[in-house]
Amino acid sequence: NAGVTQTPKFQVLKTGQSMTLQCAQDMNHNSMYWYRQDPGMGLRLIYYSASEGTTDKGEVPNGYNVSRLNKREFSLRLESAAPSQTSVYFCASSRGQAYGYTFGSGTRLTVV
Amino acid sequence: RKEVEQDPGPFNVPEGATVAFNCTYSNSASQSFFWYRQDCRKEPKLLMSVYSSGNEDGRFTAQLNRASQYISLLIRDSKLSDSATYLCVVKHWEYGNKLVFGAGTILRVKS
């Protein structure tokens, strides 16, 4: 009963380094999402994938890229990390339009 | 202006108290409404959906006023375990069915 699994849980990067955050869901959901959460800002959408093979920008896409590898997996890549990308990143998936999301446990990223 | 606005709190209440949270949203095209709960350093979890007719789940009651673009959550008989951040969330089709989150209201229930 895994739901949405994110790796890694914690990461420290130096400015300019790159990394990929991994996300996988085992609920056969079509839609997947990447959010970031900063103090006082709430969750903000970075990218989403409405279905396998499609991706779209959200509210704050700059500095990020995504890949919907298959129906299960949706990864988020930081090509050149910046201190402004220090945040908690959540992946989520959804069964459909009328439903809420199931979130992963998050990745706490610090860029120094 | 933020799309979803909430009083950040914190609301400090004794056990057994009744507490109400309010939320306003700016986009009248919003179609679906939810309350999520987020514990410290954890992921958000769906607490309940919100329907126009109002709905109740145990000690929790949610109300929606579309005319005023206002959502509320009432918690009766507060428990220590209710301490968390409560997120008001809306969804509207014109943004690809994405959820838009308020910044959250902090609740602290004390014995």
Image (cartoon, coloured by chain):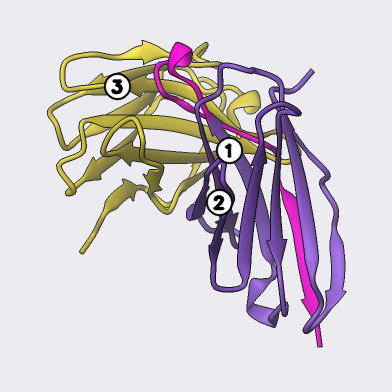
Chain colours: A yellow, B purple
Please name which of the two marks, 3 or 1, marks the residue nearer to the observer. 1
Q: Amino acid at mark 1?
A: Val
Helix, strand, or loop for circle 1? strand
For image coordinates 53% across by 58% down, the residue present is B42
Residue at the front extreme of this rendering: B53
Q: Tell me whether the residue at label 2 lies in contact with that at label 1, contact meaning CB atoms closer than 8 angstroms.
A: yes
Q: Which residues are magenta?
A: B91-111
Name the residue tied to disc 3. Answer: A49
Helix, strand, or loop for circle 3? strand
Instruction: Count neighbours of disc 2 (C-alpha within 10 A) and say few if under 14, some if 14 to 19, many if 20 or more.
Output: many
Tell me whether marks 2 and 1 sit on the same chain.
Answer: yes
For image coordinates 31% across by 38% down, the residue present is A94
In front of the other: B98 or B26: B26
Q: Tell me whether the residue at label 3 lies in contact with that at label 2, contact meaning CB atoms closer than 8 angstroms.
A: no
Name the residue tied to disc 2. Answer: B36
Q: Can you give x and y, in whole percent of width and height, for residue A5 in the image?
A: 29, 50
Name the residue tied to disc 1. Answer: B89
Disc sitting over residue B13 in the figure: none
